[in-house]
Image: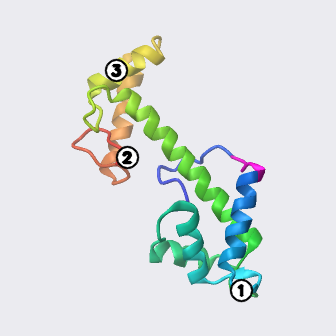
């Protein structure tokens, strides 16, 4: 999806001038008839070009439902905003995955309470065991609600 699933907002991120130019170039390439907007199909092609995957029907519906009703498609400004948000979420997920991988010392794909305690003893040695346990329980709760998969432990997948 285009927004963070765990309820946290990624930090604001700005594209480099070269990346911004690339996005504009992709918009123009996908706007074959120089209409000044992207149709639903144009948008799908643009996402494939920028992110390497075809958006799901739900993603495309979500984006197209946000389009200004006075236009027939996604303007350049709307497209750039959506791409920037998508990139922010992608970077946020990569950061989370990197941190998780650092904690997962046994390369199991999930964290046990002991893994969690060891990791926090290294990064926050003065944090109480009770606080660590509370955080672990909250993460397990999120896991059970379907945001992350796991066998009773926290796993990113």
CB contact under 8 Å: marks 1 and 3: no
Query: Would you identify the image quadrant in which residue 64 lies?
Result: bottom right
Residue 53, compared with residue 107, is above or below; it is: below
Residue 38, compared with residue 55, is above or below; it is: below
**What residue does disc 3 label?**
117
Badge number at residue 142? 2
The image shows residue 2 at horizontal and vertical percentages of 55, 61
CB contact under 8 Å: marks 3 and 2: no
The image shows residue 51 at horizontal and vertical percentages of 54, 61
25, 120: nearer the viewer: 25
Badge number at residue 13? none
Return the disc, 1 or 3, that comes first in the chain's sequence: 1
- Furthest residue in direction top, as rendered: 126
In the image: residue 45, left or right of residue 35: left
120, 88: nearer the viewer: 88
67, 136: nearer the viewer: 67
Magenta residues, start to end: 13-17
**What residue does disc 1 label?**
69
Q: Secondary structure at mark 2?
A: helix
């Amino acid at each position: 999806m285009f927004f963070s699933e765990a309820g946290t907002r990624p930090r604001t991120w700005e594209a480099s001038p070269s990346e911004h130019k690339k996005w504009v170039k992709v918009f123009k390439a996908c706007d074959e008839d120089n209409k000044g907007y992207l149709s639903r199909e144009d948008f799908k092609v643009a996402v494939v070009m920028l992110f390497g995957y075809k958006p799901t029907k739900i993603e495309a519906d979500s984006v197209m439902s946000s389009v200004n009703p006075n236009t027939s498609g996604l303007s350049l400004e709307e497209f750039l905003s959506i791409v920037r948000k998508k990139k922010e979420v992608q970077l946020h997920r990569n950061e989370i995955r990197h941190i998780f991988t650092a904690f997962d010392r046994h390369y199991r794909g999930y964290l046990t309470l002991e893994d969690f305690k060891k990791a926090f003893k290294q990064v926050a040695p003065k944090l109480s065991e009770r606080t660590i346990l509370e955080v672990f329980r909250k993460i397990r709760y999120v896991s059970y609600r379907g945001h992350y998969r796991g066998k009773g432990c926290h796993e990113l997948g």
